[in-house]
Image (tube, grey):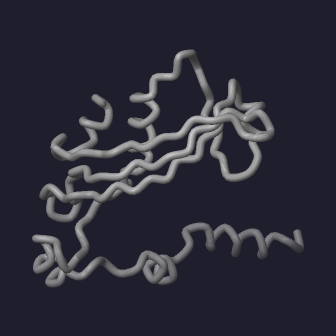
Amino acid sequence: MKRLGAALSDDAGQVHVQLEFNIDSMDVPFLCGKVTGTMVVECQRCLEPMPLAVDIDLSLAFVRDAVAAEGIPGPYEPYIVDSVPIMLLDMIEEELLLFLPAIARHELTECPARDWVENHPEPEDSATQTEERQNPFSVLANLKSSNKGK
């Protein structure tokens, strides 16, 4: 899993995969299963390794194209099959990549950078700054209203 390994802080984690393949009553081939374990990512607050518990429930329906994906019933997510045979390792790697948080961070109480964060408050809310800042186009609005009678 080279793509996943590049996104992790350390490749020492393990995941366990349990899968069931079947065809439902509407002739939809599907996969149901669970992926559990632990991966190690980098906390973006302190830049230290952080364990990430993995708990993914899978419910995928296999389809040939996007048009067929639109008609997938019930609890399934469509999985577009590009080629046969399906590379199971690639499919699990994609699910693990989708599971990774956009910004991984320890809980603040557990983060080594907690003291720094508590002593350096976040900048003011951008909504407050927007209210204080004058609209640069307000001058144009004044010109438009003064030219209405001409």
Left-right relation of 60 to 57: right
- Which residue is drawn at the image coordinates 62% and 71% (left, top)? 139
Kindly indicate the quadrant of the structure image that contains residue 94. Answer: top left
- Which residue is drawn at the image coordinates 32% and 32% (left, top)? 3
- Above or below, 27 relative to 13: above
- Which residue is drawn at the image coordinates 57% and 16% (left, top)? 83
Kindly indicate the quadrant of the structure image that contains residue 89. Answer: top left
Direction top: furthest residue: 84
* Image coordinates for residue 148, horizontal then vertical, percent: 85, 72
Residue situated in front as seen by the camera: 116 or 6: 6
* Image coordinates for residue 17, horizontal then vertical, percent: 38, 43
Which quarter shows the C terminus? Answer: bottom right
* Image coordinates for residue 58, horizontal then vertical, percent: 52, 47
- Which residue is drawn at the image coordinates 41% and 50% (left, top)? 99
Residue situated in front as seen by the camera: 71 or 75: 75
Left-right relation of 114 to 7: left
* Image coordinates for residue 72, horizontal then vertical, percent: 75, 41
Left-right relation of 133 to 36: right
Direction right: furthest residue: 149
Which quarter shows the N terminus? Answer: top left
Left-right relation of 84 to 15: right
- Above or below, 40 relative to 145: above
